Image: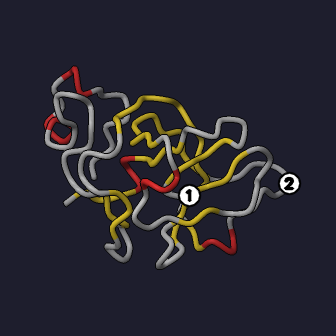
């Protein structure tokens, strides 16, 4: 997917307008970029803009906080889900501070999203880390 992280649906971006419905929900299924496994069904997540840091995409075993800095991206465009049981297929890393990262439960690639342990009802999936179909 193209890198348009500063563009909101209100600005009429071509890529986002095909993904976000008028009521702000996902129009298409959300899929793992690596294996194609379905993460979310259409119409179950809300588009949200929040700046979050996600470590670079790697296998689950290497997502740890090491001394110094961690390679990754600041992403602002996400699908927001308020219940972990809404997901079709997602896994969680071990706690990294107060955060659990979301990964594909089938191929264990990630992180594709972010969940703060302080907020039990906010699960973010980065648009740039998933495919849509």
Q: Quadrant of residue 121?
A: top right
Give SS at disc 1: strand
Nearest to the observer: residue 87 or residue 20: 87
Left or right: where does residue 87 sit relative to residue 64? left
Q: Please report whichever mark, 2 or 1, sits nearer to the chain's N-terminal start.
A: 2
Nearest to the observer: residue 87 or residue 11: 87
Classed neighbour count for the residue bearing mark 2: other residues with Cα under 10 Å, few (<14), some (14–19), many (≥20): few
Horizontal and vertical percent position of residue 123: 53, 44
Which quadrant is home to the C terminus? bottom left
- Real-space CA distance between mark 2 and mark 1, rounded to the nearest whole angstrom: 22 Å
Q: Which residue is mark 2?
A: 67
**Residue in view at x 20 percent, y 43 percent:** 19
Q: Which residue is mark 1?
A: 102
Give SS at disc 2: loop
Q: Which one is closest to the eye, mark 2 or mark 1?
A: 1
Horizontal and vertical percent position of residue 14: 13, 37
Nearest to the observer: residue 130 or residue 42: 42
**Residue in view at x 22 percent, y 28 percent:** 23
Classed neighbour count for the residue bearing mark 1: other residues with Cα under 10 Å, few (<14), some (14–19), many (≥20): many
Nearest to the observer: residue 122 or residue 50: 122
**Residue in view at x 38 percent, y 50 percent:** 128
């Amino acid at each position: 997917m193209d890198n348009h992280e500063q563009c909101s649906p209100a600005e009429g971006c071509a890529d986002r307008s095909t993904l976000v419905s008028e009521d702000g929900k996902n129009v298409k299924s959300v899929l793992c970029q690596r294996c194609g496994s379905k993460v979310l069904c259409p119409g179950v997540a809300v588009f949200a803009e929040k700046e979050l840091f996600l470590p670079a995409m790697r296998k689950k075993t290497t997502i740890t906080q090491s001394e110094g800095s961690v390679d990754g991206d600041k992403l602002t465009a996400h699908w927001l889900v308020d219940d972990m049981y809404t997901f079709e297929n997602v896994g969680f890393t071990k706690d990294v501070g107060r955060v659990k990262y979301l990964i594909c439960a089938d191929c264990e690639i990630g992180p594709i999203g972010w969940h703060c342990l302080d907020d039990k009802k906010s699960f973010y999936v980065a648009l740039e880390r998933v495919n849509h179909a």
